[in-house]
Structure formats: C-alpha cells, structure tokens
Amino acid sequence: MATYTETPVRELPFIAGAPREPHSTTTFEAVNPANGEVIAHVADCDAVDIDRAVQASVAAQREWMSWDAGRRVGVLLRFADAVERHRDVLGETDTRNMGRVLREAQGDGAASARLIRYWAGQVDRMTGHQIPANPGHLSYTTREPLGVIGVIMPWNGPVGSFCSRVAPAIACGNAAVVKPSEMSPLSALRLAALLSEAGAPEGLVNVVTGGGATGAALAEHPGVGGVTFTGSVPTGRRIAHAAAETFKKTVLELGGKSPNIVFEDADLDAAGRGAVWGVFNNAGQVCVAGTRLLVQRSIAPAFIEQLARRAERIRVGDPMDAKTHMGPLASRQQFERVSHYLQIARDEGARVLSGGGRPQGAHSDGLFVEPTVLTEVSQSMRVAREEIFGPVLSVIVFEDEEEAVSLANDVEYGLSANIWTRDLGRMHRMAERIQAGTVWGNTMRLHHPTLWFGGIKASGQGSAYAEGAIEGATRVRRVTIRFDETAPMPAWNDLNV
Ligand code: NAD
C-alpha cells in the first residue's frame, strides 16, 4: 500500500475492482494541512464517471446476492482483518490528508475493524416476519437490499466514515458508490482496494473522487436506490431534494451545536476532562463536539477557570508526533471559516478567555488554530447558535434546570447532548426534555456498533448505525398467498358463468 514516499502521486477513481482512467480530465490537489505540502493529484470525476461506477455496482450487486450468505460473511471478515492489519498506513494517510493526530487516526482503523465484524454478523440476519393475518393464507415479509447505495462522506474521520457506511450497505446485500470528501479522499481509495482483495465482486464498492458536482451526480443518478450522506445541513437539504426526484431512501447525518450541560452536583473533574476533550479533539471538527458549554451559575467561575487551564495545556502541533493532542484544521477553507467566526465572536462582544489565535511555533504553512474558550456569550450570538466546526468553545451560564433545557433546545440542531449530574432524577428529566438524537449522561461521544446514532431537527434523519442502518439500506416486501381454496377471496363472487 502507498505510504507517500514519492509525492505527489496521481490518484485515480476505483471503479469495477481497479483504479481506472476517469472520463474527466481535471484534477484537484490533496494537501497536507500541517505544512502545505501537495501529496497527491486526485481525479475530479464527472457524471460519466459516476454513471460508470453505478453500472459496475449494479452488476456486482447481482453477483453478490447470488452468493451464499457464508461467502459474503467471509469477505467482510477478511476486509475487517485487512483494515486492522493496515491501520497504521490508513491512519497515516488520513493524518497527512486532513491533519487528525496519528494516534487517533490509527485507532480509527482498529475501531472500524470491530464495526465491520459486527456487520459481518448481521449478513444472515436480514430476516422478515410471518404474519398470522388471514386464515388459509400465508403472509410474510422479506427484507431486501435497495441495490446501489450512494455514500457521500465528509472529511473529518475518513476511515471511520467509510467503514461505518460501507459495511452496513454491503452486509444488507447492496453495492455502493462512495464519493469521499474532496478534502480527504485518499484513504477511501485504499479501503476499496482492500475490500476487493478480500474477495468482493469487482464493482461491489467503487470510489469516485470529486467535489460537490460529483456528489450531486451520485445523489441524482436514477440507478441509485438509497443515499447515505454525512455532512453539513445545507448540503443535506440539497441531497434530500435530489433524492426526492427519484424517491430514493436517505439517511442524513448532519451538523450539530451540541450542548454540554454541567450541573453543580456533577463530578466536576470528570466533567472538566470531558468538556475539554469533547470539544477540542480532532481540532473541534467533530459533528457531536460539545461546542456549547452550559454551566450552572453557582459553579461557573471555578469550572470555567479549570477549563481554561486545561485548554492551555493542550499541545497543538505536528499531527505525526505522538505527544500532540491537536493537529491543524483540515483545509484552508476550514481555517478561514474558523478564523472568521473568531472575528465574529469579538465583534459580538464575547470575551476570548484563552486561545483565539495561531499557536506559537506552528509551521508557517500549517493551518493551526489555538483551542479557544469564549465566555460572556449570550444565546443570541452567532457563536452560540451556528456550527463553527473548529476548536472553539462557547460558554453560557444558566440558573436552573428549566433554563438549561430552554438554552439547550434553542438552536436549529438536534444531534447530541451531554449532561453531567449525580442526581438520577434530574438526569432522566433532562434526557427526556432535550431535543437531541443522542444523549450522553456523565460521559461524552461514546459509540458502539449496536447503538443508534442519528440526529433530529436540522441534524438529519435516520441512523447510519445499528437498526437505522438496516432501515436505510433495505426495503420490505410483503407476500400473501391463499393456500386454502375454501378461504374467502376478495372478488365479485356473484359473477358466475
Ligand atoms: P459538506 O456538506 O460541505 O460536504 C460533505 C460531502 O458532500 C462532501 O463529500 C462534498 O463534496 C459533498 N457535496 C457537496 N455539495 C454536494 C451536493 N450538492 N450534492 C451532493 N454532494 C455534495 O460537509 P463537510 O464540510 O465535508 O463536513 C462537515 C459537516 O459534516 C459538518 O456540518 C459536520 O457536523 C457534519 N458531520 C456530521 C456527522 C454526523 O454523523 N452527523 C459526522 C461527521 C460530520
């Protein structure tokens, strides 16, 4: 597998089991955000390339479903082993492509292998029901694949995003066309090759690189039965519109502005550690980052001070260095977006308690931003309401449970929420009243393949995990057979001849 010793390389889309010359002749650069180095020239594929990939998927899906379930399980298990074996180079690929610290990027491969094995275990569990509805009849349902799933990915956790979307799609009997983000396309190309080597039919999973137009061509393609999209709210809206034209099923995992609510009776040390990791990990480029710290007034001064001290100890720098906590932002565009929000915060009157600029000693071409804590934030400010997707924490003080609920729910998003309290009654009351698809109590961002994960409100619909992924990748067929000829039958039964 390529380790990028000879850079920059030319990257081709992976279609029908191999890298193929694309129809499109344009390319874009993959850039290392830690130092500005161009590491690859990547094909900017067009609608013709998407169509080729969909055609390859259609044929491969038929072959895939003609195989015995045990053989399909074998492919998934070998793929999981390969992801685990290659996790170091996969992690390095992501780190060099989008700046996530190497230790965590490599951890993503191990977690992904675990998730793929979970889906291998689901292959022969795509069952329907037998329903005792009408005497003399057999009624049953079957669960069927949609055919081809379009997977459109963001850039913030490329290996994990690929595996967590592709594994359920193929476990449910589909083929997939993956459009990775133009900011981090490289690991998806490696993963598709590994899946092919694991014995998948040629074309079962294709990777077509490109930007928004390539994604749009995939979402619009009539040969695609479902789209699983992970990304921003505006793009999610466009995809939902495109999918509606041909009635595709969609799973939409969109943005967030997740509240992290700390009550005075919480384990404040754990809450402090959780709050800092929960917002600054991956330089804040995490959909469920706890970007709004809601802290109860009685403990606010001490808690905020503790938080700022922790934030100042975060080591920002070279993501390849094992001691680094936080790397650069993933792209110039993201760097400018976060810098713009820091200016908005100042203009709106928020106080920059810590951070707020470029870290000292950072590579001059690196896209680094300090972990930033904003205080004196009010609910009406943009930094309290809009997703920044960077290392910026907005702190808001509340009086009581009622106010915490009202602040937590007063945004368009509903992805996740975190609650810290030792009062069990309060924990359950809050969990019930907060508008979020996932609620964590006294912990943050804990995932598991068996657990639903999805947003509500503008944060999306459905779940790419657990039962939601099956729902999003399959449809149900009902069959009713009258086996008893004496059983009543709906017809004009008086038309005797
Ligand atoms: P984005 O919406 O800009 O892009 C996501 C993907 O959509 C990219 O591959 C892009 O090329 C593609 N795209 C752009 N325009 C398109 C169009 N018109 N049709 C089809 N595809 C199109 O998002 P991003 O900046 O890459 O990712 C950050 C966002 O993703 C944040 O909002 C974050 O919260 C969200 N996110 C959500 C989850 C989740 O599970 N809920 C996970 C990770 C990231």
Image (tube, rainbow, N blue to C red):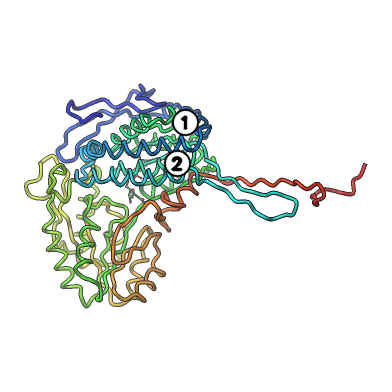
Q: CA distance from mark 1 to mark 2?
A: 12 Å
Amino acid type shown at disc 2: Ala
Q: Quadrant of residue 80?
A: top left
What residue is disc 2 on? 169
Q: Is residue 98 left or right of residue 201?
A: left
Residue 291 is situated, as x and y percent measured from the top left of the image, at 27, 59
Please state if 88 lies on the left or on the right of 259 as rendered: left
Q: Residues within 10 Å of mark 2 (few under 14, many from 20)?
A: many
* Observer-nearest of 83 and 452: 83
Instruction: Report x, y in % for residue 283.
Output: 21, 51
Residue with the most extreme left position? 361
At a point 41% along the width and 47% down the height, the residue shown is 236
Looking at mark 1, is its residue's CB closer than 8 Å to ligand 1?
no
Q: Secondary structure at mark 1?
A: helix
Evaluate whether residue 340 shows in this view: no
Residue beneath the point at 46% across and 52% down: 467
> Going by the picture, which residue comes out furthest to the right?
497
Up/down of 90 relative to 201, above or below: below
Task: Examine the rendered structure and indicate whether residue 119 appears above or below residue 29.
Answer: below
- Image quadrant of ligand 1 equals top left
Q: Which mark is residue 177?
A: none
Q: Which mark is residue 57?
A: 1
Give the class, few, some or many, for how many residues have Cα within 10 Å of label 1's Cα (few <14, many ≥20): many
Query: Which amino acid type corresponds to the residue marked 1 in the rendered image?
Result: Ser
Towards the viewer: 26 or 176: 176
Q: Return the x and y of residue 437 as percentages of the image width and height.
A: 40, 59
Look at the numbered disc 2 and say if its residue's Cβ is closer than 8 Å to ligand 1: no
Tell me, yes or no, whether the two marked residues, 1 and 2, touch with CB atoms within 8 Å.
Answer: no
Give x and y (percent) for residue 11.
Answer: 29, 27
| Residue 12 vertical position relative to residue 271 in the rendered view, above or below | above
* Secondary structure type for disc 2: helix
Precedes in sequence: disc 1 or disc 2: 1
